[in-house]
Image (cartoon, rainbow, N blue to C red):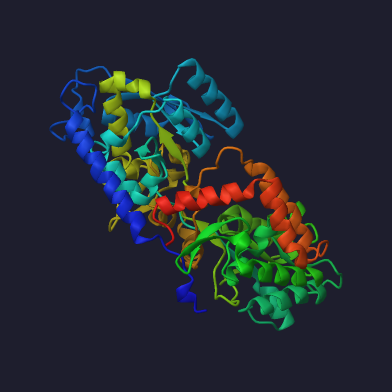
Amino acid sequence: MQQSNRVHRTGKRARSWTALLLMTALLAGCAGGNDGSGGAPVNENNTPPQASSTANQKPIKLEIIESGNNLPSPDKDQIKQELDKALNIDLSLTVYPSGDDYSNQLNVRMASGNFPDLFMINRQQLLQFSKQGLLLDLTPYLDQLQQTVDFIGEDSLKKGIVGNNVYAISKSPQVPYNTYFIRKDWLDALGLEVPQTIEELSAVAQAFTTGDPDGNGKPDTLGLTGGKLGAFAPVFGSYGVGMPGNFYEKDGTVVNSLYDPAMREALAFIRDMISTGAVDPELLANSGLQHQEKAIKGQAGIIYIDWPNMTKEQFVEQIQTVNPNAEWIQIEAPEGPAGRYDGAWDIGASPGRYAIPKALEKQPEKLQRVFDLLNYVSDPDGGSMLVQFGVEDVHYTLEGGVPQMTEQSGDVGHSWLYQFTGRPEMDYLQAKFAAQSDYITFAADQPRIEVLDGFIDNPDGFNQADATRYIEEELAKFVYSKRPLDEYDDFLQTLETSMNYSTFVDSAMTQLQELGFGS
């Protein structure tokens, strides 16, 4: 099947559904703003944020909490100071370095009624708090958040929806970072070319394992490494399937990869490749960046990894220290029966979501400031540049409209903490990491299988963690020849009956159809 027929795109019905939601929200906002019934407060003059307050008014305090790190003290936080001046606010941002610590703090505060004015939430918290009536329904207010909606895009808006209502603002989308990197100097040493197919990938990996590519006379090199089965993401893609358990559109129908007939073919190829001894024997045990360490130390010749962890200056220095002749290059995903797909990319995933407590509707002036803040950091001609790059002519300059980082740009490394609605990802990365520009573009331009997992909520009675663990354990047995692939149907049956997976799949299909995916 030709590659052009296998790239999965969001359907027209999804866009139409979102447009209908926006129109409904706009009408609701216009109808309820001025009648004194508790509807949305309206900035009638549509003035910029700076004009919504006067010079003699006392700044309004806004408290925001999220997970993160490296936030400077307020007296040294130039982003906070600039936002305070622009919006006449006194912004108090608290960050928690641990996701678990943040969740615990948020749960305590939500349970006690000590609500922040804006706070980060994940999808499960969004479901929980909205059902408890603790979150402000933003649907009637979308006209006042038009700048924000325009900035994040309609698809991102859907990621904050529960039922038919918007309860959170999701950040604008990111771009893919991962590709295969390969040691070109090893290829040259063995007289090999960059692999173009999955068969050539396997052959090169074998040569790297047995052919002494580093020339030290020792059997101390291996072919392919990565983070668990993610090392084979482009191989799965070459068969036209996502990673195990992914949902995606295929030939106009939503499918789960575990039920895609091509999944068994992909597993068989991976099994055969592993059986050659060319794959990191610790592949499934790799955690964190252990696979990166093996690449940097010169142990592995092919790695599936994100560009920052191979091309940022500190990692390049480490690589060169071990072997000054090491030359890592990005390569296209190898071609397989379905073409070239560099793994899967979840178009339903959100880089982050922020919600407002329902209690804030009783403080319309403060609520308006929160809206002003979200709109301001979403304005390309306003605060968006500030929270991306810092203060103009201090941390960056504009040359032909393109940001150029100054020597002081490192002083605002925390600016991402203020990107409550995200950023124009490619423009941001190209400006911030100019030295990695080619790597960034290469990774972002690779074709991916667009998966829909981020749009799916788990039904009651389904334990995602248990099902995921079972899938990982059994697939490991298949690819390491501990269980024959002719027992794949038995694996699915156990998954369905013991893990309630059928209920999950049925629920997922219904949810995705309601969003306009599939036929």
Residue 199 is left or right of residue 16, and the answer is right
| Front residue of 468 and 237 | 468
Where is 317 relative to 447, above or below? Answer: above
Q: Position of residue 307 (x, y in %)?
A: 56, 59
Is 511 rendered above or below residue 71? Answer: below
Percent x, y for residue 209?
79, 71
Q: Give percent across and percent down for residue 292.
A: 68, 56
**On the rendered image, what quadrant is the C terminus found in?**
bottom left
Inspect this view and state whether residue 449 appears: yes
- Quadrant of residue 216 in the image? bottom right
Q: In the picture, residue 464 is in which quadrant?
A: top right
User: Residue 233 lies in what quarter of the image?
Assistant: bottom right
Residue lying at the far bottom in this picture: please name it.
191
Q: Which sits in the foreground, 73 or 499?
A: 499
Residue 487 in percent (x, y) is at: 77, 63
Taking the spot 27% from the left edge, 45% from the top edge, the residue there is: 22
Q: Nearer the viewer, residue 489 or 196?
A: 489
Q: Is residue 151 left or right of residue 105?
A: left
Going by the picture, which residue comes out furthest to the right?
218
The reply to whether residue 379 is in sight is no
Count of labels in the image: 0
* Residue at 63 percent of width and 55 percent of height: 315
Q: Is residue 64 above or below residue 401?
A: above
